[in-house]
Image (cartoon, helix red, strand yellow):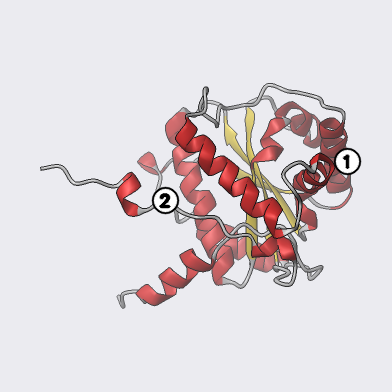
């Protein structure tokens, strides 16, 4: 077997970013299925391959996005299916969170004190940023935290597979804020836990929001050698 080109992989991981504005160009269903098939090559403990994807189209998408947007605008709250952020948030992580928000809103000229502008941009999450493909990622509730770890690798595999095909993605954590609403809207059973939403399509590289660049930790912040 010929080893893959390291330059190819480096290009995929460094060029990939969260895209929040898309072209109207549709994604062929055959291409979406190919990307999802490639994503499932991710490793998983005991080859259990946890997690599923639901493509939301047509009337189902119109209904779901309307319900999500209305719930958020009304200030509705729901218990989420899993805990994501640490409580309390350590200041080191809080600084990263603030820096990421500053990069996003700064790219589109929204000031820190512009609450209306920030809310208007955040609302785009619940419309999947108007991407041609809207996915809901779910996992069976019987899985423990290891299943979420394995499914996370599949999600990243999906993003890289899409990137290799000239597509762009954005994982949407805000979607997981309304798991009960989503289950009702899509007629899912209560054991289908909502992990996130995913926007997928062809990036609009001219959009200012897609110029957002977030910094990554330096190696010495997350790696050490012990002897």
The x and y percentages for residue 90 are 47, 29
The x and y percentages for residue 116 are 84, 42
Q: Nearer the viewer, residue 9 or 47?
A: 9
Q: Is residue 93 above or below residue 217?
A: above
Judge from the rendering whether residue 222 lies leftward or rightward of residue 25; answer left or right: left
The residue tagged 1 is: 66
Q: Nearer the viewer, residue 20 or 2?
A: 20
Snapshot quadrant of residue 207? bottom right
Looking at the figure, which quarter contains the C terminus?
Answer: top left
Give the SS element for disc 2. loop
Judge from the rendering whether residue 213 lies leftward or rightward of residue 129; answer left or right: left
* Residue drawn at (48%, 32%) of the image: 91
The x and y percentages for residue 205 are 70, 71
Residue 100 appears in the figure: yes
Give the SS element for disc 1. helix
Q: Nearer the viewer, residue 18 or 66?
A: 18
The x and y percentages for residue 156 are 51, 53
Mark 1 and mark 2: span between their CA atoms? 37 Å
* Residue drawn at (53%, 35%) of the image: 94
For disc 2, the neighbor class at 10 Å (few under 14, some 14 to 19, many from 20) is: few
Residue 51 appears in the figure: no
């Amino acid at each position: 077997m010929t080893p893959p080109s390291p330059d190819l992989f480096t290009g995929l991981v460094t060029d990939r970013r969260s895209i929040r504005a898309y072209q109207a160009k549709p994604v062929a269903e055959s291409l979406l299925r190919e990307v999802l098939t490639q994503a499932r090559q991710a490793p998983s403990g005991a080859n259990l391959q946890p997690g599923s994807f639901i493509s939301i189209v047509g009337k189902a998408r119109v209904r779901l996005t309307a319900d999500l947007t209305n719930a958020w605008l009304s200030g509705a709250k729901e218990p989420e299916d899993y805990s994501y952020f640490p409580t309390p948030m350590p200041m080191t992580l809080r600084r990263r969170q603030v820096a990421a928000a500053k990069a996003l809103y700064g790219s589109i000229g929204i000031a820190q004190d512009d609450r209306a502008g920030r809310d208007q941009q955040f609302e785009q999450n619940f419309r999947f940023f108007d991407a041609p493909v809207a996915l809901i990622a779910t996992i069976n509730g019987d899985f423990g935290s290891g299943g979420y770890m394995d499914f996370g690798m599949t999600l990243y595999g999906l993003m890289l597979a899409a990137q290799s095909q000239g597509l762009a993605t954005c994982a949407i954590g805000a979607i997981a804020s309304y798991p009960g609403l989503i289950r009702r809207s899509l007629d899912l059973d209560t054991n289908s836990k909502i992990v996130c939403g995913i926007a997928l399509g062809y990036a609009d590289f001219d959009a200012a929001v897609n110029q957002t660049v977030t910094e990554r930790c330096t190696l010495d912040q997350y790696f050490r050698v012990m002897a």
